[in-house]
Image (spheres, rainbow, N blue to C red):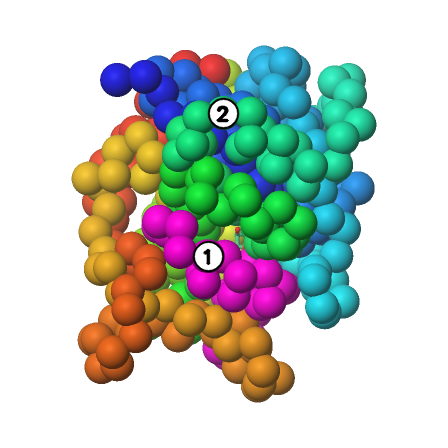
Amino acid sequence: MSPRKIIIDTDPGQDDAVAILLALASPNDIEVLGITAVAGNVPLELTSKNARIVCELAGRPDIPVYAGCDRPLRHSLVTAEHVHGKTGLDGPDLPDPNMPLQTAHGVDYIIDTLRAHPPKTITLCPLGPLTNIATAFERAPDIIDLVQEIVLMGGAYFEVGNITPAAEFNIYVDPEAAEAVFKSGIPLVVLPLDVTHKALVTSARNKAFRALGTPVGLAVAQMTDFFERFDKEKYGSLGAPLHDPCVTAYLIAPDLFTGRHVNVEIETNSALTRGMTVADWWRVTDRSPNALFIGDLDADGFFTLLTERLGRL
Ligand code: RIB
Ligand code: CA
């Protein structure tokens, strides 16, 4: 089977970085057409720099990286340096990128690329706030029918919020953008905190990254060593939750994951519950299902796949 063509939309972020590395380590499963950076964990200037740092770490300076939107549709930008550090990639000491940032805007790249390929042959993989995706749909509604699938990290139901009591960060930062994506009618696979909080980098798993004995293995171990602090303090987690790599792993090995096709709507009105993903998990409404909402994974299988693939870089 030919590799799945994807565009990664991202706000690196150590976990975004591992997701990108896993994708680039899996050319038989995934063809990364391009990467669009969005403001999220850290401002756009840093996310667009970090995406290039990761491509060069993977030995792939040929991957085109574009800067997209520098703020959400309606709200002012909320960032997460408290989780990811000042640079967004704290932990390893990685060199500044040599590869250039593409001159086109990330939103134009998404629009042009979808229009240039046969319908339903490109999957969008958002790993951050959905601002770029929603802006592309707003600017060029014709592309909505061209998207094969959207596989995104965001939201939470049983796990509730990580940035507020009600909301997960990616959705909270730009709830109006999330609403546009969840109402688009495009086939949607959602990897929420309910599953990503089960993909924890325990010390044994971190040791396995280091044991690869490669610059990538060491960098991933140092990244997860850094960003585990937040979740260890807040949740008492056994290690860093690998949120965004769940998206890439789902594309490669969907059988590692289980979920339900349910209705998910986004709270955009209430300040108290802004960005909440209201998943009708128990189907208590007649709202039609619009997302495969993932609730569980085979964590050992996930880390075996991830570690083996990282070892290829
Ligand atoms: O809430 C976790 C999500 O927010 C992850 O994608 C992380 O990188 C941040 O963007
Ligand atoms: Ca992210």
Q: Is residue 97 magenta?
A: no
Q: Residue at x 34, y 71 (%)?
A: 279
Residue 300 seen in this snapshot: no
Magenta extent? 163-189
Image coordinates for residue 254, horizontal then vertical, percent: 25, 39
Q: Is residue 140 left or right of residue 28?
A: right
Q: Secondary structure at mark 1?
A: loop
Q: Residue at x 32, y 39 (%)?
A: 250
Q: In the rendered image, which quarter is residue 270 located in?
A: bottom right
Compare residues 304 and 254 and report the one nearer the observer: 254
Q: Secondary structure at mark 2?
A: loop
Q: Is residue 121 left or right of residue 89?
A: left
Q: Is residue 169 magenta?
A: yes
Q: Is residue 227 left or right of residue 70?
A: left
Image coordinates for residue 199, horizontal then vertical, percent: 35, 48
Compare residues 115 and 5 and report the one nearer the observer: 115
The answer to whether marks 1 and 2 mark residues whose Cβ atoms lie closer than 8 Å is no
Q: Which mark is residue 184?
A: 1
Nearest to N terminus: mark 1 or mark 2: 2
Q: Residue at x 34, y 35 (%)?
A: 251
Q: Is mark 2 within 8 Å of ligand 2?
A: no
Q: Is residue 66 above or below residue 199?
A: above
The residue labelled by disc 2 is 117
Q: Is mark 1 within 8 Å of ligand 1?
A: no
User: What crowding class fits label 1: few (fewer than 14 Cα within 10 Å), some (14-19), or many (20 or more)?
Assistant: some
Q: Look at label 1 and name its amino acid.
A: Ser
